[in-house]
């Protein structure tokens, strides 16, 4: 028996959901998405000089490869799956993002961010095709396993395990590199973990799912991420309101008993995390109580910094309302709108931001891609939520009601955590969230639109090809990072710059070289760095010295 299927063996789904047996290509697409879900959690490299990108770039490559391979394998099912309003909204969002990228100041950052969005749509459509073939259960099982795996790596770091694949700066981040990313994973992944346990056909599967939920809850608590804590509160509200509103669920005693038991196991995971001694070193004497007290504090600290950042980002959006400043170009343009002591600016390099993204998905999409693209994406997510609500009310049995409720809870978690941090902008959550949305959405959720089968196939093929280009770009970035990290002379650095022309770090290092014979080369790279980030003081100073 396949390990992905072992804990979720259950009675067959409704015949209407499986018009034909799954083809070999659809089964292979399932394996690609399953493997991608696990691989994106573990993917990381040891080039510590690239402290963020050593986690991001490998995970982006996994996302792009999953979208490429699963998309190509799902081309056959694209002819059978009807186009929906959500598809039209997502295609419009991608088209406007591509138009925005054309006018971006930093085209390399724009292409990279756009590739994440394109591949997100690719895995969504591939997952939907896999689900329509009757393979949603093993796919959702793999997603639940990926969530637990990510939480487990964070717990290993919290309790003393050290490896070069972990980052010490934002522990416990495990193979995600940052405690906030682990918290986001646990928050938006918790509904899928709950679903896996609730649907388990055997007691062993239920206990395994419960143990996974306890691990995820413990890791979430240790991260002290207030955004993720709020997201879990939103999930709890959806469950508390959604179960009574779903006739098939409120009459199903076994599901209600299991849900209560799982909540107790989640509480046990939090209690264990609180009581067991760990290796984390917080500055506060009562760190978890302090985080709880500051849950909605916008008068000081990071809360006040977010309000300042949102205000300045809104000014960016008003300046470019139709297409925004370009995907991935928020850090390029933000310094022009920020005051000198803005908390979002990097303290050690004038004219740059501390993070390469704003503290909100929704702020990023609005400022970078413009109001029309933002509304199209929001419309797609709202359409999914409304479809889930309809299916909850009309569910024919408890299983169907659970799937619809899980979809709604996942959307709620993503909406809340995305309001305070970057989620869908990043490869790991993009792959897991959009795959889950594709697997959970039912045909009755999504209202069809008129589109010929050939158009649907062409759209998916175009997305797969774009994902392939994204994978190639990620591979080149990894190669450039390897060359840079290994050191060597200027010739090696020049090779790294050719591999990754969009690397500000590599261009800046080459621009700071010494020796008269390299002056022309230094100036070339100084101008390249300045073109990528015009507000960065270091690049501006070096470029001006060449004039």
Image (cartoon, rainbow, N blue to C red):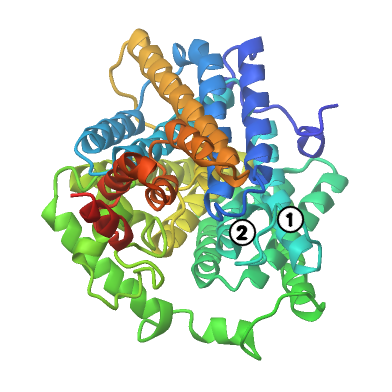
Tell me which corner region of the image, top left, top right, bottom left or bottom right, holds residue 298: bottom left
Camera-side residue of 236 and 479: 479
Residue at the image point whose x is 62% and y is 69% from the top? 223
Distance CA(mark 1)–CA(mark 2):
9 Å
Q: What kind of element bears circle 1? A: helix
Say which residue label 2 marks.
182
- Left or right of residue 409: residue 455: left
Q: Is residue 323 above or below residue 410?
A: above
For the residues bearing labels 1 and 2, Cβ distance under 8 angstroms: yes
- Left or right of residue 392: residue 135: right
Q: Residues within 10 Å of mark 1 (few under 14, many from 20)?
A: many
Q: Position of residue 519 (x, y in %)?
A: 33, 44
Residue at the image point whose x is 75% and y is 73% from the top? 273
Q: What kind of element bears circle 2? A: helix
Say which residue label 1 marks.
153
- Left or right of residue 388: residue 5: right
Tell me which corner region of the image, top left, top right, bottom left or bottom right, holds residue 479: top right
Q: Is residue 122 above or below residue 462?
A: below
- Residue 255 is tagged as none
Residue at the image point whose x is 30% and y is 40% from the top? 520
Camera-side residue of 452 and 318: 318
Q: Quadrant of the N terminus?
A: top right
Q: Position of residue 268 (x, y in %)?
A: 77, 71
Q: Position of residue 127 (x, y in %)?
A: 54, 29
Camera-side residue of 94 and 523: 523
Q: Is residue 82 visible?
A: no
Residue at the image point whose x is 38% and y is 86% from the top? 300
């Amino acid at each position: 028996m396949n390990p992905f299927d072992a804990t979720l063996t259950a009675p067959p789904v409704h015949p209407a959901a499986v018009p034909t047996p799954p083809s070999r290509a659809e089964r292979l697409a399932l394996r690609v998405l399953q493997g991608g879900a696990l691989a994106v959690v573990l993917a990381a490299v040891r080039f510590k000089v690239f402290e963020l990108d050593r986690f991001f770039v490998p995970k982006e490559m996994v996302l792009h490869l999953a979208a490429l391979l699963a998309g190509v394998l799902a081309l056959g099912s694209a002819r059978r799956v009807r186009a929906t309003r959500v598809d039209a909204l997502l295609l419009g969002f991608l088209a406007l993002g591509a138009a925005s990228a054309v006018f971006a100041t930093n085209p390399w950052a724009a292409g990279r961010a756009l590739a994440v969005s394109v591949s997100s749509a690719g895995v969504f459509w591939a997952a939907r095709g896999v689900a329509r073939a009757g393979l949603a259960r093993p796919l959702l099982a793999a997603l639940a396993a990926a969530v637990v795996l990510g939480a487990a790596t964070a717990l290993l770091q919290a309790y003393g395990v050290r490896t070069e694949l972990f980052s010490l700066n934002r522990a416990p981040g495990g193979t995600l590199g940052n405690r906030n990313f682990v918290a986001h994973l646990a928050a938006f992944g918790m509904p899928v973990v709950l679903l896996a346990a609730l649907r388990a056909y055997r007691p062993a599967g239920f206990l395994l799912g419960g143990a996974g939920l306890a691990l995820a809850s413990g890791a979430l608590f240790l991260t002290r991420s207030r955004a993720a804590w709020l997201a879990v509160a939103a999930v709890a509200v959806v469950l508390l309101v959604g179960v009574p509103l779903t006739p098939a669920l409120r009459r199903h005693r076994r599901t209600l008993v299991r849900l209560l038991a799982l909540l107790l196991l989640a509480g046990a995971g939090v209690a264990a995390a609180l009581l067991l001694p760990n290796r984390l070193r917080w500055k506060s004497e009562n760190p978890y109580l302090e985080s709880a007290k500051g849950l909605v504090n916008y008068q000081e600290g990071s809360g006040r910094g977010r309000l300042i950042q949102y205000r300045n980002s809104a000014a960016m959006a008003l300046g470019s309302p139709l297409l925004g400043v370009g995907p991935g170009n928020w850090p390029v343009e933000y310094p022009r709108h920020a005051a000198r002591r803005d908390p979002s600016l990097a303290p050690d390099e004038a004219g740059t931001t501390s993070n390469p993204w704003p503290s909100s998905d929704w702020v990023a999409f609005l400022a970078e891609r413009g109001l029309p693209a933002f509304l199209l994406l929001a419309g797609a997510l709202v359409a999914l939520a409304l479809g889930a609500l309809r299916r909850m009310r009309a569910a024919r049995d408890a299983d169907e009601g659970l799937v619809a409720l899980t979809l709604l809870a996942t959307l709620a978690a993503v909406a809340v955590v995305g309001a305070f941090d970057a989620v869908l902008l990043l490869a790991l959550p993009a792959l897991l969230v959009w795959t889950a949305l594709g697997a959970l959405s039912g045909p009755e959720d999504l209202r069809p639109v008129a589109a010929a089968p050939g158009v649907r196939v062409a759209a998916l093929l175009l997305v797969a090809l774009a994902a392939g280009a994204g994978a190639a770009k990620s591979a080149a970035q990894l190669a450039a990072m390897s060359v840079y990290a290994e050191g060597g002379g200027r010739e090696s650095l020049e090779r790294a710059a050719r591999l990754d022309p969009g690397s500000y770090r590599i261009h800046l290092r080459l621009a700071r070289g010494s020796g008269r014979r390299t002056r022309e080369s230094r100036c070339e790279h100084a101008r390249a760095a300045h073109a990528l980030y015009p507000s960065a003081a270091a690049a501006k100073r070096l470029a001006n010295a060449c004039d």
